[in-house]
């Protein structure tokens, strides 16, 4: 069990992605809470990009009305 906070673990995942590490670089045991938290942190930029793309599509649709 990790003594690090979920926020710190998520940040580790995000920083790993920023460095270009593969998602398989997750240092926590598979099926552990820390593993899932790290992976969510790693994937956050994907979700942010999807949210931005969805917002842009809505903006374009509003402009066309």
Image (tube, grey):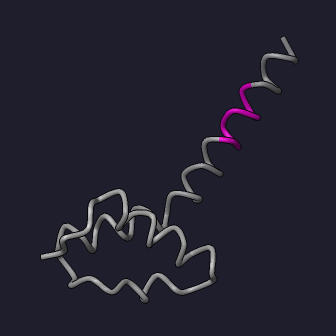
Q: Is residue 43 above or below residue 59?
A: below
Q: Position of residue 48 (x, y in %)?
A: 60, 49
Return the residue found at the far top: 65
Residues drawn in magenta: 52-58
Q: Between residues 8 and 46, which one lies in front from this camera angle?
A: 8
Q: Residue at x 53, y 78 (%)?
A: 16
* Count of marks placed on residues: 0
Q: Is residue 49 above or below residue 18?
A: above
Q: Is residue 60 above or below residue 42?
A: above
Q: Residue at x 79, y 16 (%)?
A: 62
Q: Where's the C terminus, which quadrant?
A: top right
The chief SS type of the magenta part is helix
Q: Position of residue 47 (x, y in %)?
A: 54, 52
Q: Position of residue 45 (x, y in %)?
A: 59, 58
Q: Position of residue 52 (x, y in %)?
A: 68, 41
Q: Residue at x 76, y 34 (%)?
A: 56
Return the residue found at the far right: 64
Q: Is residue 32 magenta?
A: no
Residue 29, quarter of the rendered image: bottom left
Return the residue found at the far left: 1
Q: Where's the N terminus, which quadrant?
A: bottom left
Q: In this rendering, would 59 be left or right of 43?
A: right
Q: Residue at x 63, y 81 (%)?
A: 19
Residue 31, quarter of the rendered image: bottom left
Q: In this rendering, would 18 be left or right of 25?
A: right
Q: In this rendering, would 23 be left or right of 4?
A: right
């Amino acid at each position: 069990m990790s003594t690090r906070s979920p926020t710190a673990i998520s940040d580790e995942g995000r920083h790993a992605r920023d460095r270009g590490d593969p998602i398989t670089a997750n240092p926590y045991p598979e099926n552990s809470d820390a593993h899932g938290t790290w992976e969510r942190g790693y994937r956050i930029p994907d979700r942010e990009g999807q949210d931005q793309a969805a917002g842009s599509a809505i903006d374009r649709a509003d402009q066309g009305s």
